[in-house]
Image (spheres, rainbow, N blue to C red):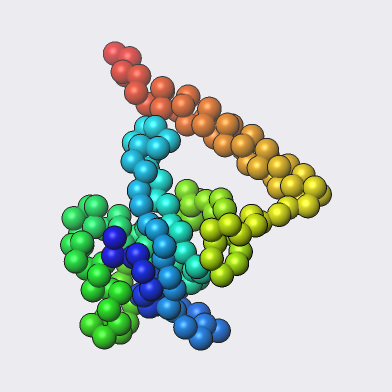
């Protein structure tokens, strides 16, 4: 709830010398709990624009709150540049589980046209994702087999 509205997100982004402002408007920010099964959640963020690594930083701080290392009020405090003029020390969330899945353009994203991919770009992306999926299946099989070996009781 603290992220909703217009805020200066410099404490939730990576420093960018080319940035003229860190003020961004977040229209929605909510968590879908166990949306993928296995205890995995999805953080959905809707905004007018994002700073460099903003969502990764938001996720990192939310994880710290969830783990009890920060209080919920710290999120609001980090958005107050007067109280926290320098970015707090935390490790940015990993990029792997984060997925940008929709971009809408226009002053008001409601009713805007969705991002368009050319057929050749769509084909290249599909090929890339198919390759990634194949690699992940191989890794999953290796991890599954190794876990089975490790979990097996030692022979006497």
Q: Position of residue 139 (x, y in %)?
A: 54, 35
Q: Nearer the viewer, residue 25 or 72?
A: 25
- Number of callouts: 0
Q: Residue at left 36%, top 52%?
A: 30
Q: Residue at left 43%, top 35%?
A: 36
Q: Nearer the viewer, residue 28 or 35?
A: 28
Q: Looking at the image, can residue 156 be seen?
A: yes
Q: Quadrant of the N terminus?
A: bottom left
Asked if residue 89 is positioned above or below residue 156 in the image, the reply reads: below
Q: Position of residue 49 (x, y in %)?
A: 51, 69
Does 103 sit left or right of 92 as displayed? right
Q: Looking at the image, can residue 55 be seen?
A: no
Q: Position of residue 62 (x, y in %)?
A: 30, 58
Most extreme residue toward the right is 120
Q: Residue at left 41%, top 65%?
A: 26
Task: Specify the quadrant of the image occupied by residue 41.
Answer: top left
Q: Residue at left 71%, top 54%?
A: 116
């Amino acid at each position: 709830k603290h992220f909703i509205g217009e805020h200066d997100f410099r404490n939730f982004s990576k420093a960018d010398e080319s940035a003229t402002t860190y003020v961004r408007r977040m229209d929605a920010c909510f968590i879908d709990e166990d949306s993928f099964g296995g205890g995995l959640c999805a953080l959905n963020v809707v905004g007018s624009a994002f700073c460099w690594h903003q969502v990764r930083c938001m996720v990192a701080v939310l994880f710290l709150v969830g783990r009890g290392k920060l209080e919920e009020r710290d999120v609001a405090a980090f958005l107050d540049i007067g109280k926290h003029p320098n970015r707090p020390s935390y490790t940015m969330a990993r990029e792997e589980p984060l997925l940008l899945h929709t971009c809408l353009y226009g002053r008001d994203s409601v009713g805007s046209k969705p991002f368009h991919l050319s057929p050749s770009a769509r084909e290249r992306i599909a090929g890339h994702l198919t390759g990634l999926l194949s690699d992940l299946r191989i890794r999953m099989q290796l991890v599954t087999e190794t876990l089975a070996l490790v979990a097996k009781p030692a022979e006497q």
